[in-house]
Amino acid sequence: MNNIVFVVDDDPAVRDSLALLLEQENLVVETFASAEAFLAARRPVRGNCAIVDIRMPGMDGMALQAELARRGVLLPLIFLTGHGDIPMSVRAIKSGAVDFLTKPITGSALLASVHAARLESQRLYSQAEASQSAAARLASLSEREREVMALAIEGLSNKEIARRLDISHRTVEVHRARIMQKTGAETLFDLARLAETGGLPN
Amino acid sequence: MASAPPIPSKLRAYAEGVLAHAPRPEGPARSAEEVLHELQVYQIELEMQNESLRQAQIALEESRDRYADLYEFAPIGYLTLDQSGRITDANLTGAALLGEDRGKLRLLHFEDFVAAEDRQGWRNALPNLLCQDGKSSLELRLQHKDGTLAEVHLDCLPRRNGANTLRIALSDITLHKQALTKVQASEDRLRLAKTATNLGIFDVDPVHDTTEWDQQVRNIWGIGPDEPADYAKFMAGVHPDDRAATRAALDLAFDPLGTGEYHNEYRVISRDGSLHQVSAIGRAYFERGQLTRFVGTIKDVSREKQLEREEQERRNEMDLLVKQQVAVQTAAAIAHELNQPLVSISAYSEAALRMLKGGAKNPEKLAHALAGAAEQAQRAGRTLLELLDFLHKGEAPMVPVDLNELVAEALAIAAESGYGEFRPVLQLEPGLRPVLANRLQLQKVLVILLHNGVEAMREAGVPAAAITISVRTFSGGNIAQVTVQDSGPGITGEAAQRIFEPFFTTKPKGMGLGLAISRALIQAHGGQLWLDLDSGPGATFHFTLPFA
């Protein structure tokens, strides 16, 4: 299930030939004639990636990328582009595409991209999971503890935090201990990374 | 006669008185018979004298009457004024000019007939007119009782026999003045028109050998305002390369058997060395086969010509730019069309290669890959041929094409190329004459219009809708018109303005060349292709083709 590569292209010969090539690498290939058909049929999982023609009738590659982002779907995209699509390719990469391959493409470049895209998928999912658990741990903090944590991450000493929040030095120490305990962070650096992963607002 | 003749009854007494005082003749007394004879002779002589006098009087009276008639009925008004300016005598014309019965004129002041504005001027002038010697003239306006004004010219002659009087010859110059004013206005208008249009005027009179050039013409030739103009000076200014043609144009105009019309464009080198492009229009007039007048206009069109040249240069540059861009875009179009099959060929062959390296355990798959590669290679070839067919304008021969058939062919091609999902509504004209055309090009134009329609309907989410294709004839059957109307959202705004520009496209995969090339192809056939903004709701394109 997690070694599926999706091919989304309106040209039937391109779909068929790419599928055949990718199958030789023991990948499972599913092809779709349009972005709409793909969105309707599949919910990608960890390890998936998609090869998408950037120009298609109806929803094109860029629109598919935007729609996937809107839906929160984690799926690395490899765009197939033609001559003169460079500005579009740049935008695609900026929006998180793994790669873009200019037609005609070579098998080795395609396979290398697919490999990279599948690794990227693993990374995206791990990152998402870490972010989720961090967010969950941060969610258990009280309002005051969040305030203390934000100031601690900024590098303020306990004394400075106490003065800033107009509480006692002792209270700050208690908050810090509880923060470390609740989040499972062992150092201030761990805590900072957790806050970033979990998306704590500064 | 110094004194009046005595009346007959007293004549005898008068004669005897004269005789009594006369000296007696000397010499011997003559006989009674002799005296009687003498007296009879005298009597006859006297009667003869008397008759002669009577004749003279009749002639005199006739002469007097004749002068009276001349005076009364002269076309000029005669007035006699006394020294205080009162009218003592007037002829009929004079009375008519004053607008009053002659009987009522006597002793009326002439100034009462003068228009209010000129009255003071008349009062001031009258004493001078009365006392100066000889004739003098003036002009003034008379005002009639009904208020109408008349411009008059006065010739005045004072008379000094006893009391001073002034004789006036009065002529009506109202019409003359009006004509003058008209001429003046006409001249003003002409001057204005000349200035506004920068027209110079020449007028040649070969009979009196005079040539008139106005200031505009002189400016072009660089000739001073008072310098006489002639043919030699004219020709000296004409650019040497244009002289022969100018002579020929003049010869043609001066041919008494021709129309006399002259039209010539040539260059003039002014005396200051500046070059002028001029356009001359004129007409020669003849009397009994002889050239009597040659008149016309000369316009300096240097600036217009310069602008025209610049405009042409700009157009050429634009054409070149478009051609270059078309070339670049054509190459891009070829690359685009070929890339698709190349992607497949490459992937099929690499897959096959890998299968072979792995021992080709599945020969069916290997065959599929190789067949796929071959099929795509052929597709690439076909695409290339189609493109070349499309781009090679004019190479295919013009043949009679039945537009009804052409529509059917285009529908078949649209369906084959994956654009067949619409419901065609055909409004054909049966028995249509064929047009002379390049079949492939017309086919391509129709297919492009169908593709555009289908794509617009797909984009708008109205698949399987109708596309109406109609074929009609216009202009008494001289022009065929083909109309393609889709059921999409139509084309408005900027897109409608720019739809025929090369490289303008609303489609993600479009090159923006289809309609631009289609329009060029239809124009090459002598027709027009346009977007109809008034027909809706879908986009409506028409193209026309002339029948052979």
Image: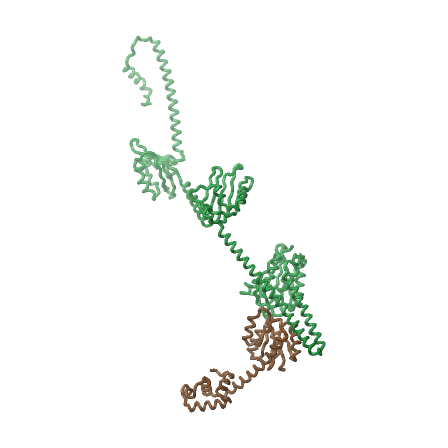
Chain colours: A brown, B green
x 41%, y 90%: residue: A168
Q: How many marks?
A: 0
| Location of residue A144 (image quadrant) | bottom left
Residue A81 lies, in percent from the top left, at 59, 71
| Location of residue B136 (image quadrant) | top left
x 50%, y 53%: residue: B306
| Residue B190 seen in the figure | no
Asked whether A66 or A188 is in front, the reply is: A188
Q: Find the residue positioned furthest to the right.
A: B363
Image quarter hosting the C terminus of chain B: bottom right
Vertical placement of residue B232 versus B438, above or below: above
Position of A57 with respect to B27 (left or right) is: right
Asked whether B313 or B518 is in front, the reply is: B313
| Location of residue A92 (image quadrant) | bottom right
Residue A55 lies, in percent from the top left, at 59, 71
| Residue B77 seen in the figure | yes
Residue B511 lies, in percent from the top left, at 59, 66
Asked whether B125 or A47 is in front, the reply is: A47
